[in-house]
Image (spheres, rainbow, N blue to C red):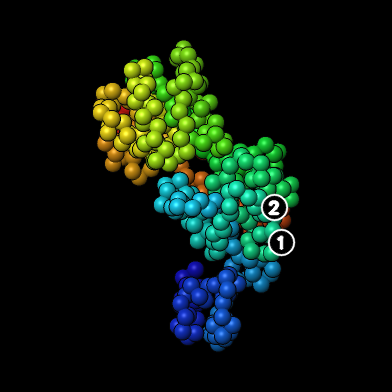
Amino acid sequence: MERGLTNRKEVAKLAGVSEATVSRVLNGIGPMKETTRERVLQAARQLNYELNAVASSFARGRSGNLGVVLPHVPKVHLFSTYYFSELLGGIGEAVHAKGYGLLLLFRDPSEAYDYVSLYRTQRVDACIILGSSAIDTERDAVHRLAEERLPYCVMDQRFDHPQLNIVAADHEQGSYEAVKHLIDKGCRHIGFLNGSPQYSNSGDRLTGYRRALSEAGIPWDEAAVYEGNYSRTSGKKAAALVYRDLERLDGIFVGNDRMAIGLMQGLRELGCRLPEDLKVVAYDNSDAASFTEPPLTTVKVPFYDMGKLAAERLLRVLADKASDPCPQIKEKLPTELVIRKSSGN
């Protein structure tokens, strides 16, 4: 491994380019000036550079790339959100360990995306789909991937197909434990600020919430369920509705930390004391959760491990020539409740 890194550095120095440029030329990634490409290849030949696994796979008709497809949402900084940054961190760790390339691709969430074409044009050897939702065009596109038995994985979003490849967290159990914690703290009138219903994990959270209430003999009140879109802004917007109902609420479960942070900010501005007037439990255990006032009790979701596991499974398929085109991937990782002050002392 160390010798390969040294060789690449020597090739870059002789060719007068960066190591990244050497990697792009040898892996066939992205546009490249012909003069630059030829200079790198000539330097590689002169130094008897031994191509790594990525370059070798490209020579055999593979791209050497694991693709990650994300939704492009204007004015939303996806890479700064905990969910996407953690998943990508785990994927990147697995890709780096195997000497593969990582190709980020963006899709318009409102339009159908042709995942299969990525394989036919040899842009990727496998792909991971992030931020997917249950709209019809996306469901059909993922179903087509499943039917082709191509190496792919959907992160954290269920689709009704028998050959669906998915890595997810156990959101139903995580939500159940969050609400049960509020019940154990003496709450009997628990609201729920959920995310968009187009995501299957929103439904899982609702199921866990209702199960915890049912086991405690607490009737479900549909009027105590509020809807956001997993953004801090939507949480702050919901604060007015929650504050209006404050006399009949003693606790609230929030579908992610970002909404919870917005909700708490909005409630404080309206004069609500937390957790004295309302106990709060959130979901994700993002980096910001321990710095809120009060610090958030929240459910830790292993996003990094999920991304790493999905990438490792796909790269294992690619490395095993004798395997089925894509053995089915179905993984559900456990969550963990992290208790802080927002749910009471």
Camera-side residue: 297 or 92? Answer: 297
Label 2 SS: loop
Q: Position of residue 127 (x, y in %)?
A: 61, 54
Instruction: Give the camera-side residue of 53 and 203.
Output: 203
Whether residue 110 is visible, yes or no, is: yes
- Residue 202 left/right relative to 121: left
Q: Is 226 situated left or right of 50 in this image?
A: left
Q: Mark 1 against mark 2, which lies toward the viewer?
A: 1
Amino acid type, label 2: Leu
Residue occupying image coordinates x 51% and y 51%: 73
Between 243 and 147, the one lying in front of the other is 243
Q: Which residue is mark 2?
A: 150
Residue 49 vertical position relative to residue 112 in the rendered view, above or below: below
Q: Secondary structure at mark 1?
A: helix
Percent x, y of residue 295? 29, 36
Q: Who's the residue at 64% across and 39% down the image?
A: 159
Q: Residues within 10 Å of mark 2 (few under 14, many from 20)?
A: many
Which residue position holds label 1? 120
Residue depicted at 69% across the width and 39% down the height: 161
Q: Quadrant of the C terminus?
A: top left
| Residue type, mark 1 in image | Arg
Residue farthest to the right?
A: 147
Q: Residue at x 55, y 31 (%)?
A: 203
- Give x and y (percent) for residue 277: 28, 23
